[in-house]
Image (cartoon, rainbow, N blue to C red):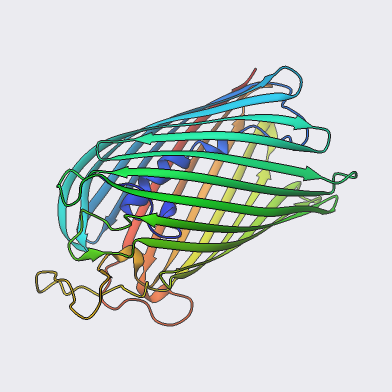
Amino acid sequence: MQIKNTDPDSAERTALGAAFLAAAMALPMAAPAHAESPPERGFVGMKYLDYLDSQPGDNRIQVRAKAVTVIAPVYSDWSISGTFTSDAISGASPAYQSSGLGAMHDERHALDASATRYFPNGTLTLGANVSSESDYLSRGLSLQMTSANESKNTTWSAGIGLNSDEINPSNGIVKNESKHITDLLLGVTQVLTVNDIVQLNVGMSWGTGYFSDPYKFADDRPRTRDHSTLMVRWNHHMEASQGTLRSSYRYYTDSWSITAHTLGLEYVQPLMNGWSVTPLMRVYSQGAASFYVASDDSSYPFAPSSTSNYSEDQRVSAFGAHTYGLKVAKRIDQDWTADVKLEQYEQRAEWRLSGSGTPGMLPFSARSLQLGISRQF
């Protein structure tokens, strides 16, 4: 089963995006960031994810994933980190738009590792990742640098990533296909006041190779995909409640004519005896790809003769989506922390923020439950 995400926000929705969510679920376990100095203590965390998505009358994809993250200081100016993820994916994937379900099962194993060198006013991080499943092998390298001014109020960052994928679907539609992606990220983080910090990131990506979904009928996508993103974050600490409001906005555009907007809000509220609660919400909206073709469930899917590229995949259609969630965490003692996080995702064509969504698209829902425990050492 091909699980690489093929649209801007598939990590928080869609069956294929569920596996990407499983890979990313370990990220919140990371210890507090140390921009200019290595962590004083080591960190180990474990996460378990249970994910299920559905459409009316059909439970589609279930993902059960386990992840372990380790961060450790090395000598006085270095730290190393690694995350191992293993997930089992089962259920049924839509052959086109929202029908034609076919049974599937697969397992994926992924490893991400990095080493960071700390300097008086910056860092240098080298990372590597590999992800393997029965029909998909992905490998990548990354390099990231940060540099702060003398007051440490402004930090500039730059990063580059190279990824190479090998694709051999079990149905034999294609053999020995590949995909190559280069990512570039530039950013700045600015401390505004003792209670406010903002961040601006600009990302660019250039991809060539096989982007089609071999498990869907009538799916022939361009062999290039370039995209750009603009991300703005603002964190505001509230003195009265000792809580923190985290807000973000993300704009996405690509060479397939997809444009997308994501607005995120979450509020972290500390409570007594080491407890904290974090309600969250996200609002997402996207336009359709230039080659998207609405399927007709009353007839067998076919390849349109009027265009060289086409797809009936719901993920490249026009729609809007809402995500609501709640995280509860407990600091057990000086070393141990536990947390549970529940999210519900709902997707509707009519929720697109501007213009109209894809007519006739069935509603899509997804529920994810995360359990985590971590220890500093």
Residue toward you, 346 or 1: 1
Horizontally, is 4 left or right of 219 in the view? right
Residue 276, image quadrant: top right
Picture quarter with the C terminus: top right
Horizontally, is 78 left or right of 51 in the view? right
Residue that protrudes farthest toward the left in the picture: 299
Q: Position of residue 219 (x, y in %)?
A: 23, 63
Residue toward you, 126 or 235: 126
Picture quarter with the N terminus: top left
Name the residue: 37% across, 77% down.
357
Q: Position of residue 108 (x, y in %)?
A: 33, 35
Q: Is residue 293 above or below residue 75?
A: below
Horizontally, is 212 left or right of 241 in the view? left
In this orientation, does residue 97 appear?
no
In this orientation, does residue 103 appear?
yes
Horizontally, is 48 left or right of 45 in the view? left
Residue 44, image quadrant: top right
Name the residue: 90% across, 45% down.
151
Q: Is residue 151 above or below residue 58?
A: above
Q: Position of residue 310 (x, y in %)?
A: 26, 70
Residue toward you, 324 or 174: 174
Count up the numbered dots. Answer: 0
Q: Is residue 304 above or below residue 377?
A: below
Q: Position of residue 160 (x, y in %)?
A: 58, 47
Name the residue: 32% across, 50% down.
16
Residue toward you, 91 or 253: 253
